[in-house]
Amino acid sequence: MSLPGLSMMRALWAYRSFVWSSVMREFHGKYRESLLGAFWSVANPLTMIIIYTVVFGQLMRNTLPGHEQTPFAFSIYLCAGVVTWSLFAEMLSRLNNVFLEHGNLIKKSNFPRICLPVIVTVSALINFGIVFALYLAFLALIGHWPGIALLAVLPLLALQILFALGLGVFLGTLNVFFRDVGQLTGVVLQFWFWLTPIVYTLPALPPQVRSLVALNPMQPLMAAYQQIFLDKTLPAFGPLLPLLMLTAGFLLLGAYFFQARVGELVDEL
């Protein structure tokens, strides 16, 4: 690990209490004025799963070849992509604006700035954990538990989180100096979602479009999640090599650019 990387890790460890207390403060603050409190953190994702199951599951139940006899096949396929993509989208959206949103804190307090992306990441993981637990409960309820293949989710999640973190820190730092980056990222995320086979299957596309969508680095990752939960089998990790290389590249680029510009953040904010 590079010296900047080591210094970041030491700073995070030294300020671990600050990171955790900030995450808890953010989580409780989200529901502080709500009558039902944290119940909404369960109600909202539960509503999403029910809608996808009832609406999309019934409309498109016969669009997955080989799974015609599974009544909830498309719901399983759809939720596997939507739940995991939501983690990626939340991380990237929030990391993109993390330094701008906490401008006052950066100006008034002296703490390692790298704590802010980590706070965003942990907060997004807590939200994801709630939704993912409900999705697993849904799979258990309908008798479609993925079994040992569920363990393969761990390396996939690690890769996804690191990719979003590297890309998000780079964009978030860049957004401080060029504010159009934030607006552009929101637009790109919308296109990126629809260019990823989540609400449709890759074989359903025309061959020309299929070859284009196959260039999307998130496509094999979503396909791996969908294979785990729909087919209950271990995915092939070979197609994830381009995403792994991109992740390494963005982690290095994000760390370098952040380290080079962190001293200028206060002036720009």
Image (cartoon, helix red, strand yellow):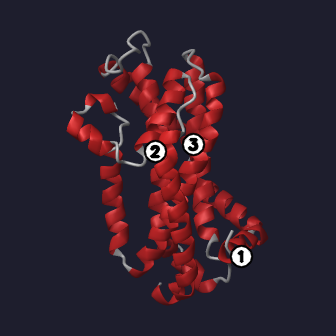
State left or right for residue 72 relative to residue 7. left
Residue 143 is situated, as x and y percent measured from the top left of the image, at 57, 15
Who's the residue at 61% across and 48% down the image?
Answer: 158
Type of amino acid at the residue the image marks with label 3: Leu
Q: Give me the C-alpha separation between circle 3 and circle 2.
A: 12 Å
Q: Residue 74, which numbered label?
A: none
Query: In front of the other: label 1 or label 2?
Result: 1
**Of the image marks 3 and 1, the number of the one nearer the N terminus:** 1
Type of amino acid at the residue the image marks with label 1: Ser
Q: Give me the C-alpha separation between circle 1 and circle 2.
A: 31 Å
Front residue (pair 265, 63): 63
Residue assigned mark 3: 156
Front residue (pair 168, 245): 245
Who's the residue at 59% across and 57% down the image?
Answer: 121
Mark 2 surroundings within 10 Å by alpha-carbon count, few (fewer than 14), some (14 through 19), many (20 or more): many
Who's the residue at 62% across and 48% down the image?
Answer: 126
**Of the image marks 1 and 2, the number of the one nearer the N terminus:** 1
Type of amino acid at the residue the image marks with label 2: Trp
Residue assigned mark 2: 85
Q: Residue 7, which numbered label?
A: 1
Please, is residue 243 above or below residue 229 in the view? below
Who's the residue at 57% across and 37% down the image?
Answer: 132
